[in-house]
Amino acid sequence: MKSNHFAFLLLLFTCLGSEAQTTINGITLAARLKRDNTELVLNGGGIRKKMFLKLYTAGLYLAAKSNNAGEIKDADKTIAIQLTITSGMINSNNMSEAIQEGFGKSLKGNTAPLQSKIDQFITTFKKEAIKEGDVFELWYVSGEGVKSFKNGKLQSTIPGLDFKKALFGIWLSDTPVDEDLKKGLLGG
């Protein structure tokens, strides 16, 4: 009898202690994302859709879960978003155009103060062809800036909290590129 109780408690604690990964649009988002000595937890995820196309699946990773978009976007804290390309219709040119459009929405049309950083960031998507299945990780690290990775390889580092706010505003501002995606990233 005691061994049955022990086995049950062990199973219960194992289940409670494990974190489940999430699968969205056939893409598995890990419960945790780690780079260097930093580990973040999945806050939420969703699909970027345009008309009938599912362009990419995104997962937002934070130190601690939150549903406050403004705080997430504006805080000088480590944060990451993972974008997995899910459409063969995405290429370097239209991804670059979409990112530029996203900055326009995030900054309410006033991109001029950050345009040189935006241009530098956009080269991340032009260095080599984008194909379905590519994974981009965009990490903001306080004191360093936004580090962009494609399939695990560092592509660029753009300094500044101002740039981080504008970049993450693409998905988390009051005028995001996709309201349903924003809701998903916030865990809703």
Image (cartoon, rainbow, N blue to C red):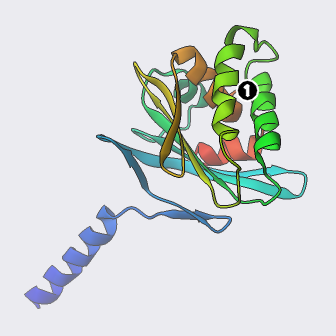
Answer few, some or many: residues within 10 Å of disc 1's Cα (few below 14, many 20 plus, some between 14 and 19): some
Asked where in the image residue 57 lies, by quadrant, the reply is bottom right
Residue nearest the observer in this picture, 31 or 92: 92
Residue in the image at 82% along x and 42% along y: 94
Q: Quick check: 66 left or right of 142?
A: right
Q: Please tell me which residue is depicted at 27% across the width and 70% down the height of the picture.
A: 14
Q: Could you tell me which quadrant the N terminus lies in?
A: bottom left
Give above or below for 131 relative to 72: below
In the rendered image, the residue lying farthest to the right is: 51
Q: Which residue is mark 1?
A: 174
Number of marks drawn: 1
The answer to whether 7 is drawn above or below residue 174 in the figure is below
Give how far across and how far down residue 58 sits, in percent. Answer: 63, 50
Residue 92 image position (x, y, % from top left): 76, 44
Q: In this rendering, is residue 85 above or below 6? A: above
Residue 131, placed above or below residue 76: below
Q: Secondary structure at mark 1?
A: loop
Q: Amino acid at mark 1?
A: Asp
Residue at image position (23%, 81%) is 8
Q: Position of residue 26 (x, y in %)?
A: 64, 69
Name of the residue lying farthest toward the top: 113
Q: What is the x, y in percent for residue 110?
A: 78, 12
Left or right: residue 121 versus residue 88 is left
Would residue 102 appear left or right of 36 to someone viewing this image? right
Q: Residue furthest front?
A: 128
Q: In the displayed structure, does residue 4 sit left or right of residue 61? A: left
Which residue is the extreme one toward the left? 2
